[in-house]
Structure formats: C-alpha cells, structure tokens
Amino acid sequence: MGDILRQLHMQEEAVEAYNRCIEQDPGDALAWTSRGAAFRDMEKGALALHCFDRAIEINADCSAAWYGKGITLRNMRRLKSAFKCFERALQIDPGNTGAWENQGWVLHIQGEYEEAVCAYRKAIDLDMLDADAWHNLGLSLKALDRYPEADEALLTAQELRSLRYL
C-alpha cells in the first residue's frame, strides 16, 4: 500500500503505511528502505538516512537500502559518501542500472569525466532505453571534447524521450 501511495505522491500517507509494516515486523529491511525513500521524497534527508541505516543494520546486503542512502546523500551534496553507497549497492547487485547512472553523475560533478563515461556506458549496457543515461553520457563526452560521440548520445536521449509520448 505504501508503494502505491508514494507513486501517487502521497508521501505522508505512505510513511504511515510503512510505519504499520514496521510495527508488524521491525526486522523488515525493505519496509525501512521504502520508508526512507518516502522521507527522501519529502526532502527530510536526516529521517531518510536514519531509515536507510536501520535497513542496512538489519540486512547489510540490501542493495535497495544502499542505493536509497546514496540518492539521499547525493541530494544532500555529500558526494563522496554517496559514491561509496552506490559502490556498495553495485557490489551486491551489479545489475542496478540506477546505481551505475548515479555513480556516473557523482563522477561527472567531481570532474572525473572518463570514469563517468564508463559508469554511464555500464548503465546503458544494462538498459539501452535509459534516456537519462544517454543524456548524461553525452554531457560527459562533451566535457571531454568528444563532440561527435556526445552529439550521438544526446540525439539518442532525445529520440528515446520522444518515444515515451507515442
């Protein structure tokens, strides 16, 4: 129920639903993770981090908790810590496209464009229809003065985004 409420942008109601799940099973790492995501959506970073940390205490191999914590830290501009969380999420689940993409974003912001390109390419290898990964790849390639490749990636992103509306 909480997940549906989050999709409907009813974050406070989602938190209440996750609270009920946690009351029934305080050891449910995914409920803590989802509660953290709802708090993150509400821009309550400290509460979100508490929930992700609790989920990680319960299950240190919960990739979703590490990923969620990384997103929260990224939003708080704590980039080195966010990178470490994405790295841990990828150790657990190398197929986590979002973690590759966000790792690339952190690398790009830090001026590590070649490494960002590698991360975006891994995200694209996992999901060739990820318009955001293509777009960000283009930006990193442009920062490296690799304009023909950048233009191709940005055009691909634009085409993929236009397909969403067909």
Image: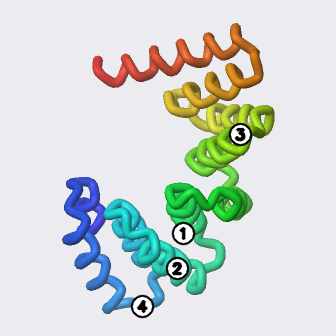
Q: How many marks?
A: 4
- Ranked by sequence position, the earlier of labels 4 and 3 is 4
Which residue carries the number 3 mark? 119
User: Which mark is first along the chain, 2 or 4?
Assistant: 4
Viewport quadrant of the C terminus: top left
The one of 67 and 141 positioned closer to us in this rendering = 141
Residue 147, horizontal then vertical, whole percent: 70, 11
What type is the residue that disc 2 sits on? Ala
Q: Secondary structure at mark 4?
A: loop
**At label 4, which amino acid type do we have?**
Pro
Distance of label 4 from label 3 (alpha carbons) = 35 Å
> Of the residues shown, which amino acid type is indicated by label 1?
Ala
Task: Return the residue at label 2.
Answer: 55
The answer to whether 56 is drawn above or below residue 95 in the figure is below
Circle nearer the viewer, 1 or 4: 1
**Residue under label 1:** 65
Q: Which mark is residue 26?
A: 4
Residue at image point 59% right, 85% down = 57
